[in-house]
Image (cartoon, rainbow, N blue to C red):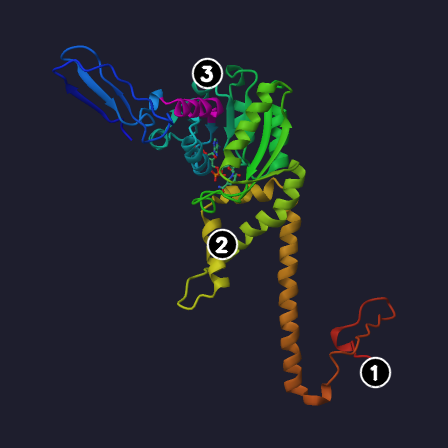
Amino acid sequence: MLPLISAKPQNLSPPLSFHFPLFPSSPTSSLSFHPPLKNTLRLRIRSIDAAQPYDYESHLRTQHIKSQSLKIAILGFGNFGQFLAKTFSRQGHTLLAYSRTKYTDTAKSLGVTFYNNPDDLFESHPEVVILCTSILSTEKVLQTLPFQRLKRSTLFVDVLSVKEFAKTILLKYLPAEFDILCTHPMFGPESGKNSWDGLPFVYDKVRIGNEEDRISRVERFLDVFAKEGCRMVEMTCAEHDRHAAGSQFVTHTMGRVLERFGLESSPINTKGYDTLLDLVEVTAGDSFELYYGLFMYNKNAMEQLERLDMAFEAIKKELFGKLHHVYRKQLFGNADEGAEDRPKVQKLLHNGAPPSAESVKPETS
Ligand code: NAP
């Protein structure tokens, strides 16, 4: 609301009069000031709250936002980097970015200053550097960064979807003075497009210095996600990878299998089918490189893929087994009744070799 100030020339010099409201910050409060000079202006400020720059509460609020805001550099300004930038920017943080591709215009539209090389970016001394590069490229990227241009107390954060690998390479390549926070926001541009409320955010404070300002900085960074309503889950990188292989990797795999399968909407979609269509949409939005990274750099992923394969085979076997039973009934009628239930005796041949399929007979009582 704009301040309402009326300025009227006065012929007579009116008595000096102030009117103090009972509640100074009430929006209806008013202050009248009649100056004692001839031909002067009569000022009437009708709303003190509207005069923002002088308002104590708004001043405090601005100061609070400033004290909480961080200077964050985003490395890797692709799909996920841009997605994060939207929320960081809305919360009032100062944002810088660098990526191998030039995203100058996109960055500008998001209120982010884009740098064409990491040297210039690092010389701007961000407090937090957040790595949003692909799982496969991150180690290579880390090997080329000019860390010597950063302040020695910089906080490095990664968002890679695999955590043990991220932790290992950050500890390997970052100077010992830097703080390290490994995180995984377990949502993306599709699943978190409307809100982050209730979505899990996993983090592991791998190496944070004891100084008060370092501790408070990491809390302020985590607060970015907490403020959006994320479910904050602190766990080790190893624990994360165990859980994520069984949930996230399986989800991505099923989404991709169904996409290859060619799932299409029909006029009689059930709720369950709609869920499958949603799954395809959510996973198809992510790059194959990301999916491949989940497989390559999470040591638990292979086991989950094999379990999925075995589960699929087991289901097929159960179905075909039932089908086989129906065929037998049609062929042999009741004469064969109970044969399926009788235990099969597999007698080994004298030479110890298993018998042929025909020689396996149901056991007779
Ligand atoms: P992505 O395909 O995993 O990564 C794309 C990013 O990596 C882009 O910024 C790209 O830079 C950069 N990049 C790829 N190859 C590079 C190379 N050789 N050298 C330098 N930079 C390279 O897709 P994403 O969805 O944006 O994911 C980014 C990170 O966020 C990944 O580590 C992923 O695990 C994590 N993450 C993603 C999601 C999600 O839902 N998408 C959720 C949580 C965490 P250019 O664009 O400049 O080429």
Q: Nearer the viewer, residue 19 or 39?
A: 19
- Camera-near label (2 vs 1) is 2
Label 2: few (<14), some (14–19) or many (≥20) C-alpha neighbours in 10 Å: some
Q: Nearer the viewer, residue 36 or 177?
A: 36
Residue position marked by numbered label 2 in the rendering: 279
Label 1: few (<14), some (14–19) or many (≥20) C-alpha neighbours in 10 Å: few
Q: At label 3, which amino acid type do we have?
A: Glu
Quadrant including the C terminus: bottom right
Q: Which residue shows up at 51% across the image and 62% down it?
A: 272
Residue position marked by numbered label 1 in the rendering: 364
**Span shown in magenta:** 55-73
Image position of 360 (left or right of 148)? right
Residue position marked by numbered label 3 in the rendering: 123
**Where in the figure is residue 86, as x and y percent of width and height?**
41, 35
Image position of 50 (left or right of 159)? left
Ligand 1 within 8 angstroms of badge 2 C-beta: no
Contact, CB < 8 Å: mark 2 with mark 1? no
Q: Earlier in the sequence, mark 1 or mark 3?
A: 3
Mark 1–mark 3 distance (CA, rounded to whole Å): 86 Å
Element on which disc 2 rests: helix
Q: Nearer the viewer, residue 222 or 131?
A: 222
> Does the magenta segment cover residue 37?
no
Number of marks in picture = 3
Quadrant position of residue 140:
top right
Image position of 301 (left or right of 80)? right
